[in-house]
Amino acid sequence: MEKRVSRTERLNILGNIAQRQLHYATFSGRAKSRIVLNKDSYDVTANVRIEHSKAIWISITALMGIEVGRVLITPDSIKIINRLQFEYMQKPFEYLYNFTSDGLDFSSLQHLLVGNVMGQENQEDTAVFKNDEGYVLRGDSNDLLYVAALDTSYRTMYTSMDETRRGQRLQAFYSDYRKAVGYDFPHHVKISITAQDLDLRSDMNYSRVVYNEEVEMPFSVPSRYKEIQ
């Protein structure tokens, strides 16, 4: 049973959460993944690289290590290469708001990918509850409902953002926490996005995680590729 904590305990819990967040300059991980896009599913390998506050780079490879897609996200843009269709797309970051809440800014997206608590869940009006499994953070702002569930060690187990007005929902589940180079990281990450005409699910099992090493994020579009407007 959940019980809302006192003001003093709330501040203590939020402080403990902040101390246990993953702090890094760069992140690099490789994960065997199953991606479901509407009615289609794909078994792929995802290589994820993050330079904190600057860029998120994702390369998707299929069988035989053949790259099928590449994504580069910065605080102001999103670029996607589709090597199967010989197409590419370049949009402002706000393009993502067609599928997720506009509360998902670049910083929140970074947190989502590595299992940190997103910024919205630390707002002053966020309510904190305690139960047998750990802690729950709940908030409601401008038609945006957000929830984060953490275990007794302040590790994120679940987070969600619901844009009630537009019927959009983002969920993430984290499990199989292991120490990796001194950091506690969820090696099993499931992320889903539900919006109008979109059902996207990613089930990722990490086999390699590295922090604070130099990362490269190559991104060039062949001249023969067609731009998607």
Image (cartoon, grey):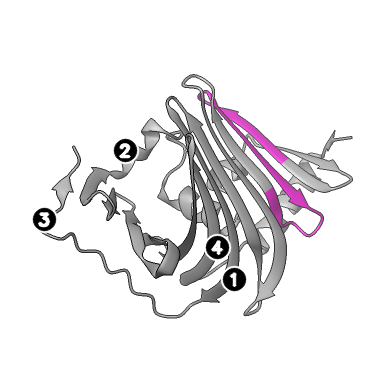
Tag 4 residue: 32
Q: Residue at x 51, y 43 (%)?
A: 36
Q: Which residue is drawn at 59% across and 71% down?
A: 207
> In which image quadrant can residue 185 be found?
bottom right
What's the residue type where badge 1 is placed? Ser
What's the residue type where badge 2 is placed? Tyr
Comes first in the chain, label 1 or label 2 = 2
Mainly helix, strand or loop, the magenta region? Answer: strand
Range drawn in magenta: 137-157
What's the residue type where badge 4 is placed? Lys
Q: Residue at x 60, y 56 (%)?
A: 115
Instruction: Point out the image quarter for the C terminus.
Output: top left
| CA gap, disc 1 and disc 2 | 31 Å
Q: Which of marks 4 and 2 is in front?
A: 4
Q: Which mark is residue 224?
A: 3
**Are the two marked residues, 3 and 1, in contact with CB atoms closer than 8 angstroms?**
no
| CA gap, disc 4 and disc 2 | 27 Å
| CA gap, disc 3 and disc 1 | 35 Å
**Are the two marked residues, 1 and 4, in contact with CB atoms closer than 8 angstroms?**
yes
Q: Position of residue 38 (x, y in %)?
A: 47, 34
Residue 98, compared with residue 148, is above or below; it is above
Looking at the image, residue 84 sits to the left or right of residue 132; the answer is left
Tag 2 residue: 95
Comes first in the chain, label 1 or label 4 = 4
Inspect this view and state whether residue 54 appears.
Answer: no
